[in-house]
Image (cartoon, helix red, strand yellow):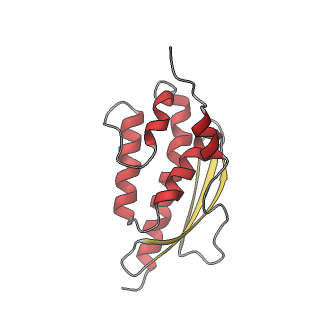
Amino acid sequence: MNAPLYNTEILRLAASIPHHARLTDPMGSAEKRSPICGSRVTVDVAVDPQGRVSDLGMLVRACALGQASASLMGAAAIGKSAEELAAARDSLAAWLAGEGPLPEWPGFELFTPALPHSARHASIRLAFEAVTEATRAAAAKAPA
């Protein structure tokens, strides 16, 4: 028997997204949208002089899986560099595609029931794609 796609923990995360307000003066922003389902995630960041995320804000208009992924990203992104976020994004994409191990990011195992549902993968990746792009943009502007 397969595990349910939308379980209690996914729904709990979807309902408790941290940093769920846009920043008023972000150093970098990015919006990512899934053409398959229309889910959309906008991420604003500020970075410290070393290019690590020091503040984060999000606007999440996504399905429960996209919201849960944004919640996991938001809970652990502060203090991460663009390179660390890109590595998480890339390992998540590889894992969802069946081309890599479970990524080293807290909570990703919750998406195991979504692995056979490739139409859901884009929504799960959105927050990580957006935070990586926003952090790279912010780091390029950060004073050295």
User: How far across and down, in percent of the image, does residue 7 sit?
Assistant: 59, 32
Please say if 93 is above or below 114: below
Specify the farthest residue to the top. 1
User: How far across and down, in percent of the image, does residue 21 sit?
Assistant: 67, 65
Q: What's the residue at 63%, 43% (across, down)?
A: 12
Q: Is residue 38 left or right of residue 123?
A: right
User: How far across and down, in percent of the image, does residue 30 sit?
Assistant: 56, 61
Q: What's the residue at 40%, 71% (across, down)?
A: 52
Quadrant into which the C terminus falls:
bottom left
Specify the farthest residue to the bottom. 143
In the depicted view, which residue is nearer to us: 6 or 141? 6
Q: What's the residue at 53%, 58% (across, down)?
A: 74
**Quadrant of residue 142 in the image?**
bottom left
In the depicted view, which residue is nearer to us: 64 or 121? 64
In the depicted view, which residue is nearer to us: 80 or 40? 80
- Circle count: 0
Q: Is residue 78 left or right of residue 83?
A: right
User: How far across and down, in percent of the image, does residue 140 sit?
Assistant: 41, 75
Please say if 121 is above or below 135: above
Q: What's the residue at 34%, 61% (across, down)?
A: 83
